Image: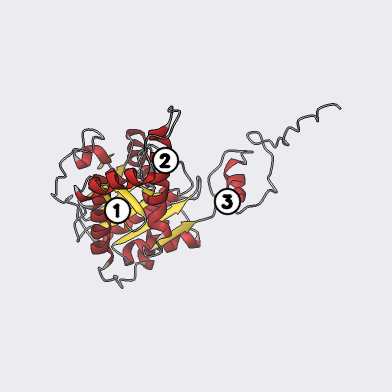
């Protein structure tokens, strides 16, 4: 779990336990059979959960299982066939913006499905899409809107960029005080008609579990983030695995709009993700060839 994983492969678990328990002794004091026997006793007591080839801590296994069940309930809802394209055009005129094809698809996807994901790198217009979604929602409904992000800085940025005051940290809105595993999950659903959660790549399994178990079936849920950002601090790469599951409607924003004058960071980051190396140098990006160590003399 300290390495960011939710479980350990069974064979790796046994091998690591064997190396750890025998470390520092001149002779081997614990054998493989003893380790397996002790692990089986822990499994019988439900302190460890063995699922196929995976070995879990009980609390983490239950979090992942209950999260999957909550996600399944969100995904069985029928799509909405309402044509919102006229409202998207209206939003562009009112907000003075122009959406790219993929941005427009993200907005359409957000209103066709009750649960969708929008992902893209820096400068690809994720915030612009959020603004349009909020505008369209306001024209269609008058229900409560909640904006969330894992950190205070990210939630304040959401409020400032979208003009929506109902933004806060996920911990505060979910009523979490700390990251202790021994919390009691409050099952009261979040009361809102539209919920947008930004910077979702920072969400770990524990926070994701509490979050998804609190989503009401009537809520329209939109997750936003950059899958190539650093993973969460706690165990579980939730956002990436949601996308890679292939069962959640996902829009990838791949056109870079925002970058400073002569800045090439966003442009070159996009090239890196495409396994290309024809980088453009600028005031904030330079290419340094690898340093070759001199060969030792004869």
Q: Position of residue 218 (x, y in %)?
A: 19, 61
**What residue is rendered at 44% in x and 53% in y?**
119
Number of residue marks: 3
Closer to us: 82 or 40 = 40
State the CA–CA distance, disc 3 to disc 2. Answer: 34 Å
The crowd level at tag 1 (other Cα within 10 Å; few <14, some 14-19, many 20+) is many
For residue 296, the mark is none
Q: Dot 1 corresponds to which residue?
A: 50
Q: Classify residue 282 as left or right of residue 4.
A: right
Residue 56 vs residue 182, the one in the foreground: 56
* Residue on which disc 3 sits: 273
Q: Quadrant of the C terminus?
A: top right
Mark 2 burial class by Cα count in 10 Å: few <14, some 14-19, many 20+: few
The image quadrant that residue 72 belongs to is bottom left
Image quarter hosting the N terminus: top left
Q: Nearer the viewer, mark 1 or mark 3?
A: 1
Q: Mark 3: give few (<14), some (14-19) or many (20+) Cα within 10 Å.
A: few
Residue 3 position in % (x across, y down)? 41, 39
Mark 3 or mark 2: which comes first in sequence? 2
Question: Residue at the location (41% across, 57% down)?
Answer: 243
**Which numbered disc covers residue 16?**
2
Residue extending furthest toward the bottom: 81
Is residue 169 shown left or right of residue 107? left
- In this rendering, does residue 198 appear at all? no
Q: Quick one: SS at disc 1?
A: strand
Q: Could you say which is closer to the camera, residue 51 or residue 233?
A: 51
Of callouts 1 and 3, which one flags the residue occurring earlier in the amino acid sequence? 1
- Observer able to see residue 123: yes
Per the model, the C-alpha gap separating discs 1 and 3 is 36 Å
Residue positioned 31% across, 46% down in the render: 205
Q: Secondary structure at mark 3?
A: helix
């Amino acid at each position: 779990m300290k390495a960011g994983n939710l479980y350990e492969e069974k064979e790796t678990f046994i091998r690591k336990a064997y190396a750890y328990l025998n470390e520092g002794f001149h002779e081997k004091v614990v054998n493989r059979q003893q380790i397996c026997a002790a692990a089986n006793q822990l499994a019988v007591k439900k302190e460890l959960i063995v699922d196929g080839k995976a070995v879990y801590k009980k609390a983490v296994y239950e979090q992942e299982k209950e999260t999957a069940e909550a996600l399944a309930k969100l995904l069985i809802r029928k799509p909405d066939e309402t044509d919102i394209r006229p409202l998207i055009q209206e939003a562009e005129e009112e907000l003075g913006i122009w959406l790219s094809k993929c941005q427009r698809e993200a907005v359409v996807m957000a209103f066709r499905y009750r649960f969708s994901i929008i992902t893209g790198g820096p400068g690809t217009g994720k915030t612009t899409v959020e603004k349009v979604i909020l505008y369209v929602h306001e024209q269609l409904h008058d229900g409560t809107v909640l904006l969330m992000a894992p950190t205070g800085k990210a939630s304040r940025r959401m409020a400032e960029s979208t003009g929506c005051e109902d933004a806060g940290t996920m911990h505060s809105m979910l009523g979490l005080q700390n990251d202790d595993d021994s919390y009691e999950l409050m099952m009261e659903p979040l009361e809102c008609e539209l919920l947008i959660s930004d910077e979702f790549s920072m969400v770990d399994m524990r926070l994701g579990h509490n979050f998804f178990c609190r989503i009401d079936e009537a809520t329209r849920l939109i997750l936003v983030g950059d899958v190539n950002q650093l993973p969460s601090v706690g165990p579980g790469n939730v956002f990436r695995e949601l996308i890679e599951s292939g069962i959640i409607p996902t829009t990838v924003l791949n056109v870079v709009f925002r970058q400073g004058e002569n800045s090439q960071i966003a442009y070159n980051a996009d090239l890196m993700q495409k396994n290309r190396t024809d980088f453009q140098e600028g005031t904030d990006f330079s290419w340094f060839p690898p340093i070759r160590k001199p060969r030792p003399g004869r």
